[in-house]
Amino acid sequence: MIVADMAKHDELFEILRSVLSHPLTEPEIRRSVPKKFRAGLDRRLSEFEKSGEIIQIRYGRYGLAEHMNLVTGKVQGHADGFGFVIPETEGQKDVYIGPQNFREAMHGDRVVCRIEGHRRDGKPEGRVIRVLARAVKTVTGIYQSRGRGGVIVPAQKRVVQDFLVPPGKSMQAKSGEVVVGSIVQYPDAHQTAEAVVIEKLGYPDDPVAERRVIIRQYELEEEFPPAVLKMADKIAEPADRDCKGRLDLRGEWVVTIDGEDAKDFDDAISIKSVPYGWELGVHIADVSNYVSPDTALDLAAYQRGTSTYFPGFVLPMLPFNLSNNVCSLKPHVDRLTLSAIMTLNASAEVTGYRFTPSVINSAHRMTYTAVAEILANPAVAPDKASADNLVLMNGLAKKIFHNRVRAGGLDFELPESKIIIGAKGEPEKIIRSDRNDAHRLIEEFMLSANRCAANFLADEPSLYRIHPSPDPVAVAEFFEFAGRLGYVTSERLELKYRLQELLKLAHGHPDEKLINFIMLRHMKQAGYSPNNIGHFGLAFAEYTHFTSPIRRYPDLIVHRLIKEKLKGAPRYLDLEGLSEAGRHCSERERVSEKAERDVTSMLKVRYMAGREGEEFDGVITGVTAFGIFVEMTDVFVEGLVRLTDMHDDYYDYRDKEHMLVGKRRGKIFRLGGAMRVRLKHVDILKKEITLEPASEKPGAFRGKRGEKGGENKGKKFDKNRGKGGSGKGKNFKNRSRRVI
């Protein structure tokens, strides 16, 4: 029935495309369409209007957006009062919206804008003519008293409108206090934005309050509803009756391998050496046994979509009793699992697999650090079985990795940082977090299990983890950039192998990090969809997420689909339901990532406070028309060297050449180059770090192959290119993880 309705909806729109050769009123449209579409036509027109496909103009007439120079998309605001509409239709250019045309829309809103001209750079410029959907219902910021009322100044820079607070609606907040306001009046041409204070969070000098600001800013759920907690707390440890009918693996050597501070263990592994190769077991917490569709617990998990991890703190997708207790695969206790048991031949190719409900009793809770030590010296293992099996696993993982790379999978190695949080919530240390063989072992085994899950479900509607191929224009731009650095690959190679070849050519050279970084920037975002287009980054024809149902809702969906297929039961989600779940979970993942990035940035700013005047070696992570972003390598913190603080010369920003060039001395700055900087100022409230050059000697900026300034040539490659600069660099450390 749902599919039929969708087909009828699409058929009507095609008819409207032919009927609306010019704007018509609803009665005129009714007379022009076939009789079967006339019932409920007003509702259908309203749906098309909400989707932005048709627009109602003056005198009640409807017209096609595509014929009226209109673009539907989401607003991306800028702190300086202007913004962009990012089109929903692939291939359309972003539309610049000037401050005078931006008063009614807010960052994140879904809008329709009219293109009214083009800027000097050829990019379209327009105005917002209709807000289709508001992105936020609350505003978080600093409260300032004004007369009998007050105003909330948003903490999010992209929200440029202040919100008036009427008298008596401030919860007696004091000036300078951080508050959350419920929006009661959105900005428009005739009225100022208004909000009423619904929560006081403290003062911005408190790191916990600052974290809560970001949580509210992204409208993340910090607490579960009482009914959900009550339901979760009633779930008991698995009893003998719960284990009946499951594959009993409690006598097998099964272990978990996670980070030192992990609490939600949702995957365990086992291995056997067999005559034809290996039998690899990946055993995943059977969350679907406890969380049934459409219950309060399930709806709360769906709403969150994912767990959000901050340094020293987590907003879990599931309540504590499930995420850290009943579902968590803790050692020496029985746990219900859904197992993927794979057979691999001597070449580490999967020759068969099966999925089955199971029960395990983990022998050890191991950490990446401990496993890496065992792999380096098996004698330090807790027992002989652990030593033998981990060495066996490592050999298998290396072969699986080799096969994946040979098939065209990309492997990025970019350093990541880890913030150590003290008892009071303040950052105490920032350290480099390297991946070792234990990380790679788990990654390859999880990829294999995910791949088998996708294959198992491929004959019926399912939910895939997809990663589109990069845009051809972006790819051409990237190869042009790499060629200027001396890295040339054959155009006859298939794209994935050409990218691989480029990574190999740059390996071990000063430009390696730069090439990895820019290549990642030119990749599209991965997401969830029932439309399987494959996974470009992994070079998999079919792929899904199966291995983390405690912290990712799509994995829980996949578990349910697998168990339904094993039982021969009907699917609980149809194609439309899977499409909506994929869209929602992709959106929740991106919101979570942004919040994690903002909290990390906030903590890094706090870590640098009080260190003004110190000098650091750094790497240029962004070059813009207004300055240079530099990451200080010893502390993994990024700051901005403004052009106004570069006193040794006047600099031109050459967009096409991707660099800043000194007019008098010819000094060149490019992405990935080395630069020594001095910490000039730290602004905790604005979350800004200002740097200045520590040395003005030309010798400090010499590049590779003796080219003067060659190591500092380039531009900032990111999704904000050409958008006026956000005033903040893009953190690229975790993009490699996001690709999968």
Image: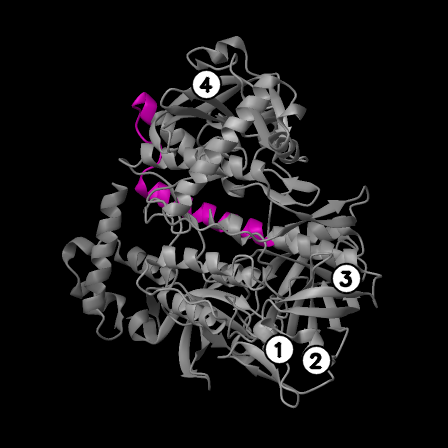
Upstream in sequence: badge 4 or badge 2: 4
Amino acid under label 3?
Ile
* Residue pointed to by mark 1: 709
Pinpoint residue 635: horizontal percent, then vertical percent.
73, 56
Query: Residue farthest to the bottom?
Result: 664
Q: 10 Å neighbourhood of mark 2: few (<14), some, or many (≥20)? A: some
Pinpoint residue 650: horizontal percent, then vertical percent.
66, 87
Residue 535 in view (yes/no)? yes
- The residue that appears at 37% across and 33% down in the rendered structure is 347
* Residue pointed to by mark 4: 358
* Residue pointed to by mark 2: 698
Q: Pointer 4 and pointer 3: residues touching (CB < 8 Å)?
A: no
The quarter of the rendered structure image containing the N terminus is top left
Q: Secondary structure at mark 2?
A: helix
- For discs 4 and 2, the disc positioned in front in the rendered view: 2
Q: Marks 1 and 2, Cα distance to the nearest angstrom?
A: 8 Å
Pinpoint residue 391: horizontal percent, then vertical percent.
54, 28
Q: Is residue 271 magenta?
A: no
Upstream in sequence: badge 4 or badge 3: 4
Q: Is residue 461 left or right of residue 319?
A: left
Query: Residue farthest to the front?
Result: 705
Q: Marks 4 and 1, Cα distance to the nearest angstrom?
A: 61 Å
Q: Marks 1 and 3, Cα distance to the nearest angstrom?
A: 33 Å
* Residue pointed to by mark 3: 684
- The residue that appears at 74% across and 59% down in the rendered structure is 605
Q: Secondary structure at mark 4?
A: strand
Q: Secondary structure at mark 3?
A: loop
- Write down the region rendered in magenta: 565-594
Amino acid under label 4?
Ser
- For discs 1 and 3, the disc positioned in front in the rendered view: 1
Q: Is residue 691 left or right of residue 5?
A: right
Q: Marks 4 and 3, Cα distance to the nearest angstrom?
A: 50 Å
